[in-house]
Amino acid sequence: MLVLLESSAGFAIFKVLDEKRLVESQNVLGDFADASAAASAVQLCQFVKFDDITEALAATTSLLEGRISKKLRKALRKLQTTEVLDGVLGVADSRLGSAIKEKLGIGCVCSSAVMELVRAIRSQIDALLPQVAPREMAAMQLGLAHSLSRYKLKFSPDKIDTMIVQAISLLDDLDKETNNYVMRVKEMYGWHFPELAKIVQDGQAYVKAVKTMGLRENAISTDLTECLPEEIIEDVRNAALVSLGTEMTDADLVAVHSMCDQVSEMSEYRTQLYDYIRSRMNAVAPNLTVLVGELVGARLISHAGTLLSLAKHPSSTVQILGAEKALFRALKTKHQTPKYGLLYHASLVGQANAKIKGKISRMLAAKTALAIRVDALGEGDSVGPDMGLASRAYLERRLKSLESGGGGRGGLGRARAQSDRFVPDFGPSGAGYTGKRDADASAANAEQRGEKRPAAAVGGDGDSEAASASSPPKKKKKQQRDEQAAEVKQEPGEEQPASAKKAKKKHREEAAAAEPQEEEAAAPQSDKKKKKKARQSVA
């Protein structure tokens, strides 16, 4: 059995002298207690030394990726003898063993016993590799560690978007500082020309006007066309003539001009920083940039930490990213949760009406989540902006459809609309469910509400009888009462009752008069009333 050992100096291949003893041993490190014990356990077969640190770094990165480097391939081809073919090669990495077996046809084994043996050999590496001095080995280990750290830091996918995160944070800080400086300029210059702040609303234009004009007396003779629109220049000059501000000394004017210069410098630097963020976003996340823009995409990455972390978020989280306080406040107070966070500043959401902003933000979040995963995990030709362009075109068509009122109902609304067209009808025998559409459904709903069934839903006497037979007992009694009331209304020679209640009352009185017992009881009562009235008239 042979064992492959990777070191900072090169590749070493050892032959195990007593394989059975090492396998059965409970303490492999004890068998390598000193140099003599290690020499009696394994024997060096071949050692391939690295020429420089660059070759060592290339071989190490290949091992980390599970690939065979040129140096290792050369060493293994030399050992393709009967010794190797009869036995196996022990390796510490299973991926490397699979690559060696696939490319070179050498059987490899990777187990806990092999890893323990490699660890024991590494403890006595100075004695087992006399070709390399201990001091040289330590220097090569240190150099390889530094080179590998720089390589991983340079090509780490998590570090590509670090500059974007820092740049967008710096951009936000610049905006805050610029606003503070503009506010200070307005406070200081407002004592001299207070009317200018009301006429010129834009901060950058205000600062340029102050820098160009100086004292308000110079407003008439100064050309302000480079810093102000033509329609408000005349207003500024008229306001300067009747201004109520105080006088300003030369020292105060120098201080104001100095602050104006700083505002102009920060404004120019912000423009350069925005161009840098746009170029980096187009290179790192082109699909995300197409969908939501450079600034919103950079803020999403900054909020999540890295592009890879953002790719792990579902679309529901991307939709409300940046509105965490509002979300937890809504959950605590049992109110409606927010519909959007940072995505509110996207152009697609801004173009939508107030009623459909939530729907557009939900659809945009779904497409954005897919675009982020393509940008973070895509390889080769899939990292282009094609997916983002197609998604944006679909969202724009969907937005136009919703604004024009042709959006239609969603899946649940469509299912409810289909189910409302059918009502349960089990028939007279109760054999099974059948569906009635449109007019029958509306008629059945009217019967359930206690209303009179429309004539269009009834197909003659036979249909009415079948409907009454199939209806429950309570509905049957109610229908009989309605029919009796209708018959009372239709009798000729009698006055029509004012309402259904009067018709029912009259019908009950007629039914009571038809009974003989009630007629006999009613006759004496009428005689008594007549006698009583006669007595009252005589008195």
Image (spheres, rainbow, N blue to C red):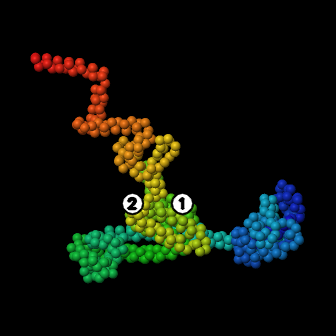
Secondary structure at numbered mark 2: loop
User: Going by the image, does 357 lie left or right of 433?
Assistant: left
2 or 1: tag closer to the N-terminus: 1
Which residue is at a point 61% across and 74% down the rendered structure image? Answer: 380
Which residue is at a point 31% across and 78% down the rendered structure image? Answer: 229
Q: Which residue lies under the disc numbered 2?
A: 355
Relative vertical location of residue 220 with respect to residue 127 in this rendering, above or below: below
Q: Quadrant of residue 267?
A: bottom left
Q: Nearer the viewer, residue 468 or 18?
A: 468
Task: Measure the alpha-carbon separation of dots 2 and 1.
Answer: 24 Å
User: Going by the image, does 404 lie left or right of 369?
Assistant: left
Query: Which quadrant of the figure contains the C terminus?
Result: top left
Q: x and y percent of residue 427 in the render? A: 47, 43
Q: Are marks 2 and 1 in contact (CB under 8 Å)?
A: no
Which residue is at a point 41% across and 45% down the rendered structure image? Answer: 463
Q: x and y percent of residue 120 in the render? A: 81, 62
Residue 134 can be seen in this image: no
Residue 114 can be seen in this image: yes
**Residue situated furthest left in the rendering:** 538
Q: Which mark is residue 314?
A: 1
Query: Which quadrant of the figure contains the N terminus?
Result: bottom right
User: Going by the image, does 186 lie left or right of 400?
Assistant: left
Which residue is at a point 30% across and 72% down the rendered structure image? Answer: 200
